[in-house]
Amino acid sequence: MIEKIKDVFVCIVMAVLAYLKPIEGELWSLFLIFFLNFVFGYLADMIANGEDFQFKKAFRCICEATVFFILCTVIYAIGRFKGQQAGALQCVSFITYTIIYFYAMNVLRNLRQLFLEGTTPWNVVAFLYYVLRFKFIKRIPFLSDYMNIKHKQHEKD
């Protein structure tokens, strides 16, 4: 009986993986950026801030990642159901690049805390942060507009 349940479970997992094959690269990209965010966030807390591992933060990181994985897979599935797979792939790609942008900013912020200011690694990370924050933002449609509006709202508060 347990063997049959295991076989059914394996078949379901394989079917889902086959269905999601067109967005496999996007999902792996998300996994990588969430993994880096987790690792460097933990290291920054431990080394720079002197804090111990916190299950609450780890759980939150895993929950955030899960939400974005589900969002991308649901958007892809809806696009396929509607017969617009190309549009769904483009939408998933756009969402993935946006997620990568914001989480990469957080990863670089954490790396700046890990390195001593003025050292070569700190300068490299600070430069990458600058490029990502002020130059790369122009390459993602609507993101610079959003950041400007967000900045103006922050100034009002």
Image (cartoon, rainbow, N blue to C red):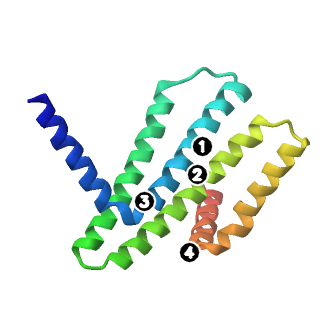
Query: Cα distance, mark 3 to mark 4?
Result: 26 Å
Badge nearest the viewer, 4 or 2: 2
C-beta proximity under 8 Å, tags 3 and 4: no
Q: Residue at x 85, y 36 (%)?
A: 116
Q: Position of residue 70 (x, y in %)?
A: 34, 53
Left or right of 36 on screen, residue 4: left
Circle 2: element type: helix
Left or right of 24 on screen, residue 44: right
C-beta proximity under 8 Å, tags 4 and 1: no
User: Mark 1 highlights which residue?
Assistant: 36
Work out whether mark 4 precedes mark 2 in sequence or the reverse, and give the earlier one: 2
User: Mark 2 highlights which residue?
Assistant: 103
The image quadrant that residue 46 belongs to is: top right
The circle on residue 54 is: none
The circle on residue 24 is: 3
User: Mark 4 highlights which residue?
Assistant: 142
